[in-house]
Image (cartoon, rainbow, N blue to C red):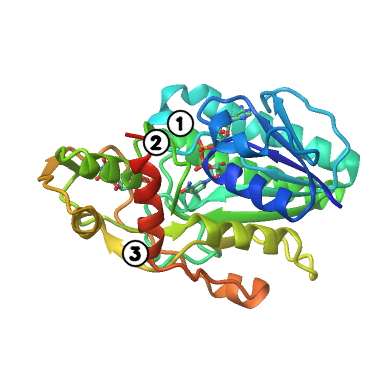
Amino acid sequence: MKRILITGGAGFIGSHLCKRLVEENNDVICLDNFFTGSKDNIRELIGLKNFELVRHDITKEYFAEVDQIYNLACPASPPHYQYNPIKTIKTSILGTMNMLGAAKRCKATILQASTSEVYGDPKVHPQTEDYWGNVNPIGIRSCYDEGKRCAETLMMDYHRQNNVDIRIIRIFNTYGPNMAENDGRVVSNFILQALKNEDITIYGDGTQTRSFCYVDDLVDGMIRMMNNPQKFIGPVNLGNPNERSILDFAKLIIEMTGSKSQIIYRPLPQDDPVQRKPDISLAKKELNWEPYTDIKTGLEKTIEYFKTKI
Ligand code: NAD
Ligand code: UDP
């Protein structure tokens, strides 16, 4: 039985990770400040003897004896991370330092949930891990992008200087049940708009692309990365390379929900990346991992989830 700390465990991805690791009989501490997460996401785990819920903010130190740390705490959707940008960057920098300090003290392995946003508006397509990115350091996405880039730097420096056992994953757009209804990301927005027969809001002309990964596939990759026997530290891309335009995605949601919604166009937010698609050759080679859920199967489960919310 491993003792595992999951920061941001009551959030979208964290809640799936908590569930899986509890089912696999680990002793799980879920730590969250409930900024964007919710107790509802982990309600079925509360009361189980190998699950513990802690309300805490990772910008402050936290002490617990653990073997592994998954550091997921950080708001992930643009409206949420732009709501209080100073807090967002503090969470990535002070929070990651606190968790690295904890990993160092306990000799735990720490996995950092980094992001495709470290590539910014990428000029290399698809994105490979050796690409250094094209990030605006002073824009409205910078609190998130630069915070996550600095967190990667901290991970590498604690590894080189203090021998901390680290793993860095770069997560690409992920979707599934437990996404917050109000989080403003494209998957939740489009599904909710379609289910309510409201206008579907495309930002820009809809030619920008994203590649969507179902959450179960991602969680599988995260656990493989944490426990890989070669101690491969990454960074490694985890995502689904199946790329599509936002306009095509809107049409797919309308078709799958049988909605009467019309598509409308809104201004494109500043620094919105034009294209995004992971190259996952490294994950295949080092972790023998690739996503297996096709978009329709994943979206069916996600649509069913959102139906229960309206
Ligand atoms: P989410 O907003 O649902 O979850 C984040 C969780 O962290 C929430 O429960 C929130 O309350 C908690 N949190 C935020 N700040 C905190 C703090 N200071 N102290 C303690 N808890 C705090 O987002 P998510 O989609 O589940 O993302 C999880 C992680 O994965 C994030 O680090 C995010 O940057 C990363 N990521 C996600 C995606 C994606 O597509 N979902 C893509 C790239 C990276
Ligand atoms: N988007 C959109 N309509 C929405 C929400 C998002 O057209 O209601 C677009 C957004 O501008 C971006 C893409 O969908 O180009 C993905 O946005 P999201 O916020 O989900 O994640 P990002 O990948 O930009 O962090």
Of residues 18 and 206, the one drawn nearer to the viewer in this rendering: 18
Say what amino acid the circle numbered 3 marks: Lys
Using residue 102 as the reference point, say whether residue 150 is left or right of it. left
Give the distance between the C-alpha atoms of the residues marked 2 and 3, in whole angstroms.
Answer: 25 Å
Q: Of tags 3 and 1, which is closer to the observer?
A: 3
Labels 1 & 2 near each other (Cβ < 8 A): yes
Badge 2 is on which residue? 78
Q: Is mark 1 within 8 Å of ligand 1?
A: yes
Return the x and y of residue 237 as percentages of the image width and height. 55, 62
Badge 1 is on which residue? 81
Task: Note whether 12 is above or below 278 in the view shown.
Answer: above
Say what amino acid the circle numbered 2 marks: Pro
Badge 3 is on which residue? 296
Task: Note whether 246 is above or below 306 in the view shown.
Answer: below
Say what amino acid the circle numbered 1 marks: Tyr
For marks 3 and 1 on the same chain, the one whose residue lies earlier in the sequence = 1
Q: Of tags 2 and 3, which is closer to the observer?
A: 3
Q: Is mark 3 within 8 Å of ligand 2?
A: no
